Image (tube, coloured by chain):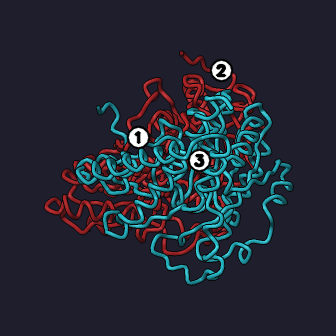
Chain colours: A red, B cyan
């Protein structure tokens, strides 16, 4: 079935990140009657960030369903619904609240296919925003994607712009396996082009967002934009960074990272999540193994310090890796 | 008494003795080292699984517990597939990756035994939501033990099931024991009061009387199928063995353990069947059939293959387009 966008809601040329997600949800619901969306305040209120606004009146409150504040049960219910033939899309209001869903996600969703001998898959998506920068404090700001990337059976996506949010969400919803779809609160208002060809983006493919020969910087999510700013500063002093937006954390695009490393021979991995035991640690370890001969310098990581996300704006600013930190790390690597 | 009714009762008898004899066989295989890992036997509780299974349709769904052999068998899992799984064979229903605590058959609506106490409840709730959204009259059943009453998801699920009027039967097998502790030392609220708090009808059945279970489940399921919303059914029963097989149950009063056979649901049902005019040799021949089928299943599993590591390690994700 063809989807006709409602032009009063969406500008086809440019969409906000939140609207791109909304459009992907709407199109998937149009195309597949087994897709339904549920979560706290997603129907009447349109979601705390307005992502699901307008969907309830269009698809009805059966398929856009408000839930009580019962994250553990909702996530398990998504598993049960997926095992019974539906494609649930669950919204968890903040990634910090994913802690309440861990049994469902880790023990049930991730394992059902494998432990039932491949009889079934669990086609569910959990959408949830991570990230700080809005002074939301220690329990509304965390980036916990590495936890999920550590669990066999889960896929973990983290789009950095409206086109990717749209295309990757469509891929996530049609994917047969459980996907943790990590959005970013700081990006919801971001505007960007969503071209027609964004309709579907293959999961597991990184995007080169800047070309350079001097070092590779691998990142994902909102940090992509910080890295791009840092790369411009570096360019002013003659250091050209090759910047990769991973887009998909599990699986991650090992061959794209290796190809970039072969070109630059220096690798910096940057993310907003805590550096210790993080996504960067995995990429660094893997590249240290398969890319060792390419390296002209030790692999470097830059993430948040091993500290909870603080509330005070002055503290949070210190906490988050900024463009200056990235520039310093890159210069150090290229020295 | 019609032949058809007799046949239905005998089917239920066959199911009940199948669960009993399968588990007794498992107990010996476990002792002999032919069943690895943990098993949790439901000996003494067979009437609940057999009674419920006799009511459910193939399009109904069940989610089960760590003590779920009976639920799996009564939902129709073939004993060959079952033994092959518990004996860790490639031919097992889960290719030897799940074992006792994860026996499942999605094509039969058996959404899996589950090693996490209480998890069957919200999973069944999600299945009930799927039935409701698809506008079928299928029913989802959450089997759970009394120990699971202390899990938070149970309380969340009572609320949600009532709020959304889901086609969900909360089927509690109350055996009085939560793992190694008596439930009365762990949980303060009786189930009927909990159900009442959410305005969900609650019924209690003698879980050692298979006909009582059958009629109670039928009544609940009929009401749910007709669109009446969720119900809670509490079947009072007894756990004969330990929390896990091999558990010496030193925590359990000896007088309680000594009287357990008095509650055996099988002789009780046999007496009822004989009273209905069914001859004892008919029952004996059913037992002999079941015994032969079990021995054949065990032999088949013994002759089966060990799971292939390469296949197992490559089956974590769905390979789109793969055969």
- Residue tagged by mark 2? A6
Q: Viewed as shown, does residue A208 lie left or right of B270?
A: left
| Rendered-image quadrant of the C terminus of chain B | top left
Query: As rendered, which of A251 and A49 lies closer to the eye?
Result: A251
Say whether residue A243 is visible. Answer: no
Q: Residues within 10 Å of mark 3 (few under 14, many from 20)?
A: many
Up the image or down, A190 lies above or below A6; here it is below
Q: Dividing the image into 4 quarters, which one contains the N terminus of chain B?
A: top right
* Mark 3, residue position: B50
Label whose residue precedes the other's in the sequence (2 or 1)? 2
Chain on which label 1 sits = A
Q: Residue at x 77, y 30 (%)?
A: B226
The residue shown at (56%, 52%) is B64
On the image, the x and y values in percent for residue B96 come to 33, 53
**Residue B77 x, y percent position in the rendering:** 46, 43
Horizontal side of residue B314 vs B282, given as left or right: left
Q: CA distance from mark 2 to mark 3?
A: 54 Å
Q: Nearer the viewer, mark 2 or mark 3?
A: 3
Is residue B307 visible in the rendered image? The answer is: yes
The nearer-to-camera label among 1 and 3 is 3
Q: Is residue A175 toward the left or the right of residue B267 in the image?
A: left
Q: Within 10 angstroms of label 1, few (less than 14), some, or many (20 or more) residues?
A: some
- Name which residue lies at 69% across and 48% down: B213
Same-chain status of marks 2 and 1:
yes
Reply above or below: B244 against A72: below
CA distance separating discs 1 and 3: 25 Å
Q: Which residue is mark 1?
A: A119
Q: Secondary structure at mark 2?
A: loop
Q: Which of labels 2 and 1 is toward the front?
A: 1
């Amino acid at each position: 079935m063809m989807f006709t966008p409602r032009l009063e809601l969406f500008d086809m040329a440019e969409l906000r990140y939140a609207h791109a997600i909304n459009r992907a949800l709407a199109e998937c619901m149009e195309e597949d009657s087994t897709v339904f969306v549920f979560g706290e305040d997603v129907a009447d209120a349109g979601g705390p960030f307005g992502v699901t606004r307008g969907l309830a009146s269009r698809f009805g409150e059966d398929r856009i369903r408000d839930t009580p504040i019962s994250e553990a049960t909702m996530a398990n219910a998504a598993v049960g619904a997926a095992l019974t033939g539906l494609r649930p899309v669950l919204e968890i209001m903040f990634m910090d609240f994913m802690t309440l869903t861990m049994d469902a996600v880790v023990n049930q969703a991730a394992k059902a296919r494998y432990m039932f001998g491949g009889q079934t898959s669990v086609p569910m998506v959990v959408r949830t925003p991570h990230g700080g920068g809005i002074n939301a404090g220690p329990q509304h700001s965390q980036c916990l994607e590495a936890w999920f990337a550590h669990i066999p059976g889960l896929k973990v996506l983290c789009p950095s712009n409206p086109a990717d949010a749209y295309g990757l969400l469509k891929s996530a919803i049609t994917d047969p396996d459980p996907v943790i779809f990590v959005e970013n609160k700081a990006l919801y208002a971001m505007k960007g082009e969503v071209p027609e060809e964004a309709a579907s983006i293959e999961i597991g493919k990184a995007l080169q967002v800047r070309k350079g020969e001097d070092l590779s910087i691998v990142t994902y999510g909102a940090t992509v934009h910080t890295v791009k700013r840092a790369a411009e500063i570096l360019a002013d002093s003659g250091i050209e960074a090759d910047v990769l937006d991973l887009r998909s954390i599990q699986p991650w695009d090992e061959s794209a990272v290796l190809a970039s490393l072969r070109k630059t021979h220096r690798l910096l991995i940057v993310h907003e999540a805590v550096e210790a035991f993080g996504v960067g640690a995995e990429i660094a370890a893997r590249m240290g193994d398969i890319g060792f001969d390419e390296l002209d310098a030790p692999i470097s990581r830059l993430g948040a310090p091993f500290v909870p996300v603080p509330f005070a704006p002055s503290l949070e600013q210190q906490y988050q890796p900024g463009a200056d930190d990235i520039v310093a790390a890159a210069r150090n690597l290229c020295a | 008494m019609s032949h058809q009714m007799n046949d239905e009762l005998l089917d239920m008898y066959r199911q009940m003795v199948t669960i009993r004899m399968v588990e007794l066989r498992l107990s010996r295989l476990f002792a002999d080292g032919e069943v690895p890992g943990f098993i949790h036997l439901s000996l003494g509780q067979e009437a609940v699984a057999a009674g419920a299974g006799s009511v459910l349709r193939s399009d109904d769904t069940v989610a089960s517990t760590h003590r779920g052999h009976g639920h799996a068998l009564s939902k129709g899992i073939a004993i060959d597939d079952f033994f092959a799984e518990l004996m860790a064979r490639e031919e097992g229903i889960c290719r030897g990756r799940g074992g006792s605590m994860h026996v499942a058959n999605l094509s039969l609506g058996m959404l899996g035994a589950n090693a996490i106490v209480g998890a069957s409840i919200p999973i069944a709730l999600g299945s009930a939501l799927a039935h409701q959204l698809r506008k079928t009259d299928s029913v989802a059943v959450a089997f759970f033990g009394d120990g699971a009453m202390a899990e938070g998801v149970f309380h969340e699920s009572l609320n949600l099931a009532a709020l959304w009027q889901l086609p969900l039967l909360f089927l509690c097998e109350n055996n009085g024991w939560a793992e190694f502790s008596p439930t009365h030392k762990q949980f303060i609220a009786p189930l009927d009061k909990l159900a009442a708090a959410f305005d969900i009808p609650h019924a209690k059945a003698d879980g050692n009387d298979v006909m009582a279970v059958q009629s109670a489940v039928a009544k609940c399921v009929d009401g749910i199928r007709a669109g009446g919303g969720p119900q809670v059914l509490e079947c009072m029963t007894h756990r004969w063995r330990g929390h896990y097989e091999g558990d010496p149950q030193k925590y359990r009063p000896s007088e309680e353990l000594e009287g357990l056979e008095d509650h055996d649901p099988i002789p009780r049902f046999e007496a009822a069947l004989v009273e209905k005019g069914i001859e004892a040799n008919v029952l004996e021949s059913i037992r002999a059939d079941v015994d032969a089928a079990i021995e054949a299943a065990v032999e088949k599993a013994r002759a089966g293959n060990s799971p292939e590591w390469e296949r197992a390690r490559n089956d974590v994700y769905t390979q789109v387009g793969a055969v």
